[in-house]
Image: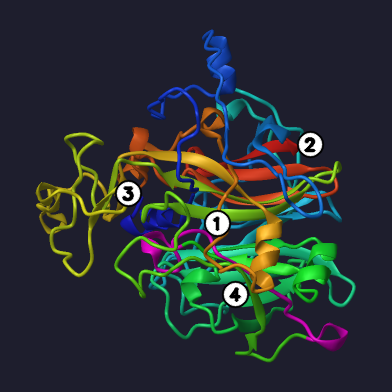
């Protein structure tokens, strides 16, 4: 595999909260047993979620709690391994199609400089009954409804270096069934329009776009998408039925997940003109490192190595609700910009050449001791054991829960955009396979330092089914985990 092929792994994602779940300490190494494997070994360890507050004053219904999610199992994705028409090194974006009871998922990511210009193709798959298995090879496999197509051919060509993609299916009477898309890249150009739409019939996409989300920082807008329940959108955000956001590591888009509501059509369903700045309503936006050198006005427990890669607006038949984000939460006692230290996960290894920001911090956001800033390798000499990036002494795969009433207060200017905090967290590591190709560990890490655990999520609102991508679970392919929301 080429270095450029490995680079796409940077796309892969994950999740955040100030405190760790109340569960036994685990290494989360690649050999960590899944639920089925643990049962086979007689391991009856119970993982308990932490609920940080109860829905005591929430207007409009109860809050969905972690205990309301029941794990059903997982399934594999179909197809071979030849790019670009493969899910290997893919899974950047996923959305549920309630009209077909299917999922749209993106495949192998584009590679910059012409290496793979037709990556991030989209396929639609039928959803099998999920199962619990110790080996991903034993999971049921989805089948294609629409094979891979390239509906974004010729679009977003200025953003192909480690692309970031969000998708949301919406069949609104004004427009008919469409796939709304957000597109960015790791190092974001400041003036590249990031949003559009295309037809759910992938062989005739009829792409429309590209647009900006207001005047928001592009690092805050183009990583994931979700739909907003119509009644809530009508009541609080002037009928803006789509939401988009992005969490960029290093705090460049905001120190926590972000969310903006918008509607990209006018009278009769007409799309905005190319380059338009679509009006938006801010629902969640933390402070940006461009404005402060400190960790402040952030999500509680925020660390610069946090990864939030997907979001969903949950509603349950019993009236419960929550806004959920999925990702890989840095819960380290320290985190740093640099490399894995071969001496072990307890030790930092900063890029000693970077001096324009604090490259190592403790969990409380303060700077690491001076000894941690000496570095431990030099990439130019080829003696680093990992790729450069944000690393932590520990990551955990998590789902975090926000109260929609808080977001309504932000929309009404009754709360600052950085004031809402997660009210609960669910650690899902016990269900993961963490089974990447060994040659990808130089980018992904290993053990407690395995990053990019979770990718995008999708929600079947009618049946209360939450779909969550685990990245690099079936070799280079993701698998889809499923929870019932009660």
The disc, 2 or 1, on the residue closer to the chain's N-terminal end is 1
The disc, 1 or 4, on the residue closer to the chain's N-terminal end is 1
Distance of label 1 from label 3 (alpha carbons): 31 Å
Q: Residue at image x 66%, y 63%?
A: 407
Residue most extreme to the front: 57
Distance of label 2 from label 1 (alpha carbons): 27 Å
Crowd rating for badge 2 (residues with CA inside 10 Å; few <14, some 14–19, many 20+):
some
Residue 153's label in the rendered image is 4
Q: Which residue is mark 3?
A: 364
Distance of label 4 from label 3 (alpha carbons): 45 Å
Q: Residue at image x 42%, y 74%?
A: 188
Nearest to the eye among marks 2 and 4: give it: 2
Which of the 4 quarters of the picture holds residue 399?
top right
Which of the 4 quarters of the picture holds residue 143?
top right
Query: Front-most of 395 and 362?
Result: 362
Rendering coords of residue 62 (x, y %): 77, 45
Q: Which residue is mark 1?
A: 92
Q: Residue at image x 66%, y 41%?
A: 54
Residue 486's label in the rendered image is 2
Confirm whether the magenta stretch covers residue 249: yes
Query: Front-most of 287 and 335?
Result: 287
Check disc 4 and report its element: helix, strand or loop: loop
The disc, 2 or 4, on the residue closer to the chain's N-terminal end is 4
381 relative to 44, above or below: below
């Amino acid at each position: 595999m080429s270095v450029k092929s490995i680079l796409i792994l940077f796309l892969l994602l994950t999740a955040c909260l100030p405190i760790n779940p109340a569960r036994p300490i685990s290494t989360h190494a690649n050999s960590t047993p899944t639920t089925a494997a643990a049962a086979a070994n007689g391991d009856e360890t119970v993982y308990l979620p932490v609920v940080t507050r109860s829905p005591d004053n929430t207007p409009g219904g109860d809050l969905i709690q972690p205990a309301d999610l029941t794990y059903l199992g997982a399934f594999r994705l179909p197809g071979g391994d030849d790019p670009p028409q493969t899910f290997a090194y893919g899974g950047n974006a996923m959305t549920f199609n309630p009209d077909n009871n299917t999922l749209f998922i993106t495949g192998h990511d584009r590679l910059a400089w012409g290496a793979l210009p037709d990556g991030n193709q989209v396929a639609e798959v039928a959803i099998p009954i999920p199962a619990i298995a110790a080996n991903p090879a034993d999971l049921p496999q989805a089948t294609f409804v629409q094979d891979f197509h390239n509906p974004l051919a010729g679009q977003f060509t200025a953003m192909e270096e480690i692309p970031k993609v969000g998708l949301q299916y919406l069949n609104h009477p004004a427009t008919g069934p469409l796939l709304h898309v957000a597109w960015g890249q790791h190092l974001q150009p400041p003036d590249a329009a990031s949003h559009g739409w295309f037809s759910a019939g992938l062989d005739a996409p009829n792409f429309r776009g590209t647009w900006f989300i207001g005047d928001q920082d592009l690092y805050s807008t183009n990583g994931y998408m979700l739909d907003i329940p119509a009644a809530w959108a009508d009541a609080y955000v002037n009928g803006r039925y789509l939401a988009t956001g992005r969490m960029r590591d290093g705090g460049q888009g905001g120190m926590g997940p972000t969310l903006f509501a918008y509607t990209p059509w006018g009278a009769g369903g007409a799309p905005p003109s190319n380059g338009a700045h679509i009006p938006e309503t801010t629902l969640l936006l933390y402070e940006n490192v461009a404005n402060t050198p400190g960790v402040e006005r952030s999500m509680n427990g925020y660390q610069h190595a946090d990864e939030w890669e997907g979001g969903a607006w949950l509603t349950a038949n019993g009236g419960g609700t929550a806004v959920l984000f999925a990702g890989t939460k840095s819960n380290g006692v320290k985190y740093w910009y640099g490399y894995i230290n071969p001496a072990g996960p307890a030790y930092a290894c900063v890029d000693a050449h970077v001096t324009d920001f604090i490259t190592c911090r403790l969990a409380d956001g303060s700077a690491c001791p001076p000894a941690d800033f000496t570095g431990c390798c030099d990439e130019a000499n080829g003696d680093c054991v990992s790729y450069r990036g944000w690393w932590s002494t520990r990551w955990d795969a998590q789902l975090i829960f926000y109260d929609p009433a808080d977001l309504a207060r932000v929309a009404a200017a009754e709360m600052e955009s950085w004031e809402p905090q997660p009210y609960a967290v669910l650690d899902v590591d016990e269900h993961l396979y963490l089974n990447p190709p060994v040659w990808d560990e130089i980018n992904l890490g290993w053990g407690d330092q395995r990053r990019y655990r979770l990718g995008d999520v999708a929600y079947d609102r009618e049946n209360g089914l939450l779909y969550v991508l685990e990245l690099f679970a079936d070799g280079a392919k993701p698998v889809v985990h499923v929870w019932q929301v009660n």
